[in-house]
Image (cartoon, helix red, strand yellow):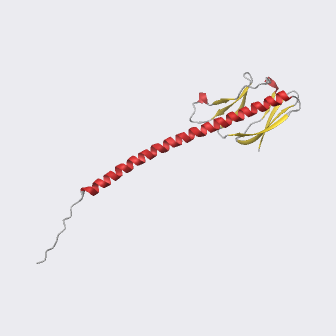
Amino acid sequence: MSKVLRRRVVSSPVRGQFSIDFFLVLSIVIAFAVLLYNVAISEVGKSTLLDSAILGQNTLDSIASGIDFAAFAGNGSHVRKELWLPADVNCLFFNQSANHFYCFVSSGYLPSSKNRLVSRTLLSSLGSNLALQCVPRPGWFAADFSNNGTNVVLACHPI
């Protein structure tokens, strides 16, 4: 007589358990990945804002030093500076009473009351003797500072 071996098929709880564990671990990994992605995007935005603020402040300080140079050097003086202005900085507003330039940084990371960059106060008290012929655009531009005897002229040209 031949014996027929019958295999008994039993559903394995181990397989089902493995599947549930796998999806549980996978969902936790995906949740952490989404959190890390959001934090990374936020930090990149803040870093970009800081870069723009520093570049805008550097541009303002260069403009202030160029105007002071042209004012103190006297009639016929001329200096040219090549400057970079980031895309999210709106620049070159002059406050005549405080005698300084300022810019605005547009960003969702700053409240509107804190988005203003202020240059150092001009050493020369020009008042109405400052002729601004400059509307700086984002990117590289050349700033020409000259003194014609009555006014200090600031002219901008894209490079």
Q: Is residue 108 left or right of residue 57?
A: left
Q: How many marks?
A: 0
Residue 31: x, y in percent?
A: 41, 45
Task: Out of 69 and 117, give the one closest to the viewer.
Answer: 69
Farthest residue, direction bottom: 1
- State the image quarter where residue 11 is shown: bottom left
| Relative horizontal placement of residue 9, taking residue 89 as reference (left or right) | left
Q: Position of residue 133 (x, y in %)?
A: 79, 34
Q: Residue at left 78%, top 32%?
A: 66
The image quarter containing residue 4 is: bottom left
Q: State the quadrant of the C terminus.
A: top right
User: In the rendered image, which quarter is residue 152 located in?
Assistant: top right
Q: Which residue is rendered at x = 41% and y = 48% of the image? A: 29
User: Residue, x 32% and y 55% (percent of image)?
Assistant: 19
Query: What residue do we see at 34% from left, 53% from top?
Result: 22
The quadrant the N terminus occupies is bottom left
Horizontally, residue 53 falls left or right of residue 149, namely left
Furthest residue toward top: 97
